[in-house]
Every structure is written in C-alpha cells, then in structure tokens.
Amino acid sequence: KSLAILEYFCFIPAASWSAQNKFLGFTMSNQSNCSKEYFVQRAKLAEQAERYDDMAYAMKECVNCVHSGSPGAPLDNEERNLLSVAYKNVVGARRSAWRVVSSIESKTESNEKRAQMAKSYREKIENELKTICHDVLELLSKFLIPKAKEDSAHHDSLVFYLKMNGDYYRYLSEVSVGDERNANVGKSNDAYKEATDIARDNMQPTHPIRLGLALNFSVFYYE
C-alpha cells in the first residue's frame, strides 16, 4: 500500500513552496492594502481551517509587510506565536513524511525500481522541507532577529527568535549530510547557545520561552 502511494505521488510535478502559495492568492505584499492586520486575519482564518501552508505564507507576507515600510508595529506576542505555530505545522508534516519515506526506502533496497521510486519521493519532500526552513531562516536573519536586537527592553522576543533559528537549522541538519550537515549543526548550536546566554541573564528560570529553549536545546544535544 505504501509503495502504491509513492508511485502515485512521484509523478506529481514538484512545485516550489512559493509557487504553490501563489496559486492560493497570498502573494499580495505589493498591493496597496498591505497591512499587518490583514495578513494576521488571513493567518487566523487559515489556522481555523487547519490549512497551515496558507497560514505560514500569510505570516511570511505579514513579516515582509511590516518590514517593507508599510504602517504597522513589529510582531506582538500573539502574532509571533502565529508565525511559530504556522511554520511548526508546515515543517512538521514534511519531517514526518520524510521519516516515513526514508524508512520505506531502506526496506526496498532489494527492489531497484521501488527503491528508486522511494528515493525520488524522499528527495522531493527533502527539497520542500529545505525550502521552508530557508524561508523561515531568511525572515529571522533579515528582519526579526536584527529588529529584536534593537529593542533591548524585550529580551523575550530575541530569545524566541534565536530559539527558532536554532530549531530550523536543526531541522535542516536532519536531512543533510557531510559538510552541509556539520555547518547546519554548528549554526544551530550557536543560535541555541546565544539564546541561552541571553535568557540566563535576563529571564526567570520558569519563563515559558526559557523553558522551551532548554527543552529544544536538550533535544539538539540528544540527537
């Protein structure tokens, strides 16, 4: 049954992450109605419908909109969590799929045709996962982390974004090998360590963001 599913999906053209979302009508940041509130409402609607790809793209446009000179303050706590939840679900689905297909691939080594089919599908999922991770990392490095560093009064935002940075480099390391994997592991470690140092100096030990950081950093070490 699993191989039949693979055979079906391997013949579907692999559209890019951005291309998929253009079809959904979310590439609107250049329009006159670009506003943070608009995209936040789109994200909330998508979340209620459990359409997390739409939700993630809406929040991506929200961040781009906020930092493109359009009116609107930086992301508040609720909006920051919307961004995190959206991409966590989007990348989580690909991580789970990648593990399933990788397992199938390892079990079909004796059948060259089926092994190649599984390999092709794994690579398709891998490319989607990498594109999504790079999308998040670009938002973090280009907009969110620099802006948070300017606001020394709110260390929670900076720790939150640095934790996300560590998370998504960790996800990349799961599907990369050799020097690329080593580089991703190093960047993940650096982000977690920087976040931990800031949290230790400026946040209570029981702060939810600091606890979440400690949990994810421990997962990083374990894996």
Image: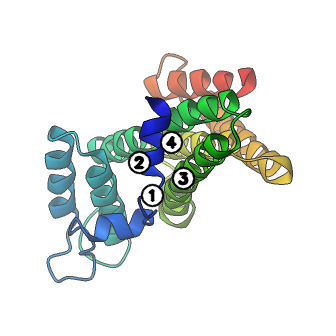
Pick whichever of labels 2 and 3 is earlier in the sequence.
2
* Element at label 2: helix
Q: Quadrant of residue 137?
A: bottom right
Percent coordinates x, y for residue 105 in the rendering = 64, 35
Going by the numbered disc 2, the residue's amino acid type is Tyr
Closer to us: mark 2 or mark 3? 2
Q: How many other residues sit within 10 Å of disc 3, few (<14), some (14-19) or many (≥20)?
A: many
Pick whichever of labels 1 and 3 is earlier in the sequence.
1
Disc 1 to disc 3: CB gap under 8 Å: no
Res 155 label: 4
Q: CA distance from mark 2 to mark 1?
A: 6 Å
Res 8 label: 2
Disc 2 to disc 1: CB gap under 8 Å: yes
Using the image as rendered, state which of residue 17 and residue 207 is in the foreground: 17
Q: CA distance from mark 2 to mark 3?
A: 26 Å
Quarter the C terminus occupies: top right
Q: Is residue 163 above or below residue 18?
A: above
Percent coordinates x, y for residue 67 in the rendering = 38, 71
Using the image as rendered, state which of residue 51 and residue 206 is in the foreground: 51
Q: CA distance from mark 4 to mark 3?
A: 24 Å
Q: Is residue 91 above or below residue 223?
A: below
Residue that numbered label 1 is attached to:
11
The tally of labels here is: 4
Going by the numbered disc 1, the residue's amino acid type is Phe
Disc 4 to disc 1: CB gap under 8 Å: no
* Figure coloring: rainbow
Q: Is residue 178 above or below residue 150?
A: above
Pick whichever of labels 4 and 3 is earlier in the sequence.
3
Going by the numbered disc 3, the residue's amino acid type is Cys
